Amino acid sequence: MDRNRRSFIAGLASLAGVATADRVAAQTVPHVHPSAPPVKTIGVRGASATGVAGVVPVETPDTPPLPFELDGRVKVFRLRAEPVKTEFLPGRKVDAWGFNGTVPGPAIAATEGDRVRIILENHLPEMFAPHWHGLELPIGQDGVPGISQDPIPPGGSHTYEFTLNQNGTFFYHSHMPMQEMMGMIGLFIVHPKVPHQPHVDRDFGLIFQGWDIKPNNTVPNTLAMEFNWLTINGKSGPATTPVVVKRGERVRIRLVNLSMDHHPVHLHGHHFFLTGTEAGRIAGPHVVPENTIIVGVAQARDIEFVASNPGDWMLHCHLPHHMMNQMVSMVGPMHGSGPGTAVPGYPQDMWMPMDELAGAKPELIGLPQGWTGAMMGMMTLVRVVEPDVFDRIEKLRAEASK
């Protein structure tokens, strides 16, 4: 079967549409553009990255930030929609679609009140258009093909420009459903002009996705209704990079779900409060404690907690099939040895330490041998460590990034 099952539309330059005044400043250019040249990275790392005192930058484990350049007062971001070869685990190669070489795409971060310009090139073999999920924009910037703009043809580009009048956890994604299932999403964080209270010391962003990848295949099955690979920021446990915080810090985790399933996300060792959605900040006081929260399809949920309990705590979807990878159907009786063989259905669970698949990341320092035995699928860790351990990890991270 031809993997590019929609290639019959790849040659179309555009769909018929009605021009609006908002399209004048955001024109589709139907010719091939070279890859975007390197730009000076501004405001990506460090406390000054947000531009607002008391507002910390968002960390996105396993997913890079998107740098920008300044054109006067306008922040200019460059995105390329393109096929991406990635790995959910070392050796588990996947032919996905993403942005700027990553799945999910790089995280956009700006501040409420900023004027942003996003230059989007389509390097896919078919037409494409993005949507800026949760952002309230002029209709010409919304990105819905056939309604607010013509789709961007292969080799074309489109420029979006708008002012950010909200703050919160938003995201961008393809508005073509099958392309969404190929992985096309990225975080779009808008920091507030005035810090929210109570102040947080650490801020993280995590994207949850589900995939169906058949044996001996590298291409996701975008028509599937059941999924055998579950990822957080494009990695599956134990390859997910842990969130590391100091004991006593207040932590925000932004959870975003673009998959075919809702995810009851559970944090071990702590309770938290829901403080925001993809529509923005929830008015406080936040008084309902939880430690499991449903993150529905196309939703964002911001949770906050005080990391008062030291340890290595699981953060994971609690759907049983989402805590494993490569599920297969049982075919006939299962066989084993020992007294359990007299029990129908024995054996069921598998204990599979896979430490070698986790890599040698600084964030893993101090974890016990065999820690990966229960870390599969849509799972990661929140590591609450003492300040000296945190500083050691930060030093190693800085050295590794040079």
Image: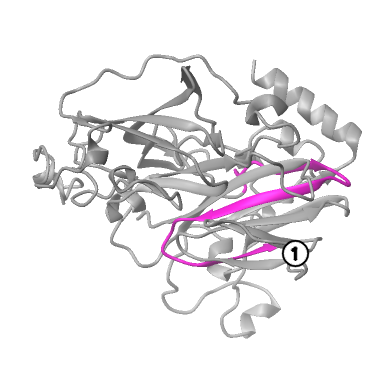
Q: How many marks?
A: 1
Q: Is residue 288 left or right of residue 340?
A: right
340, 203: nearer the viewer: 203
Q: Quadrant of residue 212?
A: bottom left
- Callout 1 environment at 10 Å: few (<14), some (14 to 19), or many (20+)? few
Point out residue 122 in the picture as x, y percentages from the top left corner.
Answer: 26, 33
Looking at the image, residue 59 lies above or below residue 182: above
97, 24: nearer the viewer: 24
**Is residue 18 part of the magenta span, yes or no?**
no
Point out residue 175 in the picture as x, y percentages from the top left corner.
Answer: 30, 51
Q: Is residue 46 visible?
A: no
Q: Which residues are magenta?
A: 238-266
- Give the residue pinned by disc 1: 286
Point out residue 195 in the picture as x, y percentages from the top left corner.
Answer: 71, 42
- Name the residue rendered at 48%, 18% in the picture: 70
Q: Is residue 83 visible?
A: yes
| SS at mark 1 in the image | loop
- Name the residue rendered at 67%, 79% in the picture: 340
* On-image quarter of the C terminus: top right
Looking at the image, residue 168 lies above or below residue 392: below
Point out residue 132 in the picture as x, y percentages from the top left corner.
Answer: 40, 46
Amino acid type indicated by mark 1: His
Residue farthest along the front direction in this orientation: 21
17, 381: nearer the viewer: 17
Q: Is residue 21 left or right of residue 337?
A: left
- Name the residue rendered at 37%, 54% in the picture: 213
Q: Is residue 79 left or right of residue 244?
A: left
**Is residue 263 part of the magenta span, yes or no?**
yes
212, 135: nearer the viewer: 135
- Name the residue rendered at 80%, 61% in the picture: 270
